[in-house]
Image (spheres, rainbow, N blue to C red):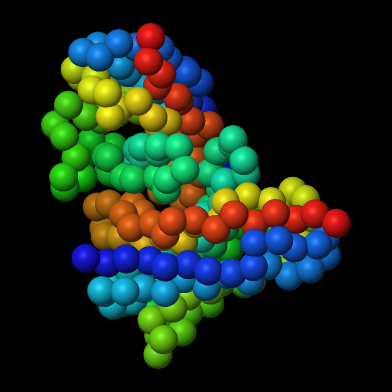
Amino acid sequence: DIQMTQSPSSVSASVGDRVSITCRASQGISSWLVWYQQKPGKAPEVLIYAASSLQSGVPSRFSGSASGTDFTLTINNLQPEDFATYFCQQVNSFPYTFGQGTKVEIK
Amino acid sequence: QVQLQQWGAGLLKPSETLSLTCAVYGGSLSDHYWSWIRQPPGKGLECIGEVDHRGNTKHSPSLKSRVTVSIDTSKNQFSLILKSVTAADSAIYYCARGTRSYYYDYMDVWGKGTTVTVSS
């Protein structure tokens, strides 16, 4: 299985801040990387697919980038509704595997 | 707008069989794949298996001997069976729609989740 190492596990930030979350794949996955947001008691929602494509309806302050086996989710101008947990998922080969998650908390 | 409604028993004893069903409303089973994902309390997400409208399946190797994912196109539903459950199978189980092409693959519609607890 491909291992996805996500960091940090949590980050404290203020409204208006920029937050970056990283996932590293244990082997090459090209751009087969998805980012999800999950709020407490809710199912995950897709933010970014194909490493950098913004899902329809997702605010443009969310962006994704890739460099080799490293993938970054950036949230610009953090808004109150962005405080949540974020997961990456590789969809290069089954079983699709997720990162451990990053909780974005209010500072 | 496609919605997924899932149901199944939430409390099981060790060695029993977990059975969940997910109904698809507002869309066809074609052109997508259909997945089951679980999340132990306070932990990360794990893909269990998937099925397409033709009945082609993939199962997680770690669960393969115990899991069956199936589809019923006449009812617009798909299902998960997990045999011989233990406490380690306690989790929130989600059904989800997968959208896949030559360029992308992601799960864009999710059910609300079913909490399954395995306890004697």
Going by the image, does B108 lie left or right of B48? Answer: left
Give the camera-side residue of A6 and B13. Answer: B13
Compared to residue B2, the image places residue A71 above or below, namely: above
Q: Residue furthest bottom?
A: B74
Q: Position of residue B95 (x, y in %)?
A: 46, 61
Q: Quadrant of residue A104?
A: top left
Compared to residue B60, the image places residue A35 above or below, namely: above
Instruction: State the quadrant of the C terminus of chain B.
Output: bottom right
Residue at position x 48%, y 79% in the image: B71
Compared to residue B94, the image places residue B66 above or below, namely: below
Q: Position of residue B107 (x, y in %)?
A: 36, 54
Going by the image, does A105 lie left or right of B115? Answer: left
Residue at position x 57%, y 46% in the image: B39
Q: Position of residue B3 (x, y in %)?
A: 32, 66
Instruction: State the quadrant of the N terminus of chain B.
Output: bottom left
Residue at position x 42%, y 45% in the image: A42
Q: Quadrant of residue B93?
A: bottom right
Give the camera-side residue of A61 and B99. Answer: A61
Total numbered labels: 0
Residue at position x 40%, y 38% in the image: A38
Give the camera-side residue of B11 and A26. Answer: B11
Q: Is residue A68 visible?
A: no
Going by the image, does A54 lie left or right of A83? Answer: left
Q: Quadrant of residue B101?
A: bottom left
Q: Is residue A36 visible?
A: yes
Q: Position of residue B69 (x, y in %)?
A: 56, 72
Give the camera-side residue of A17 and A40. Answer: A40
Compared to residue A61, the image places residue B46 above or below, namely: below
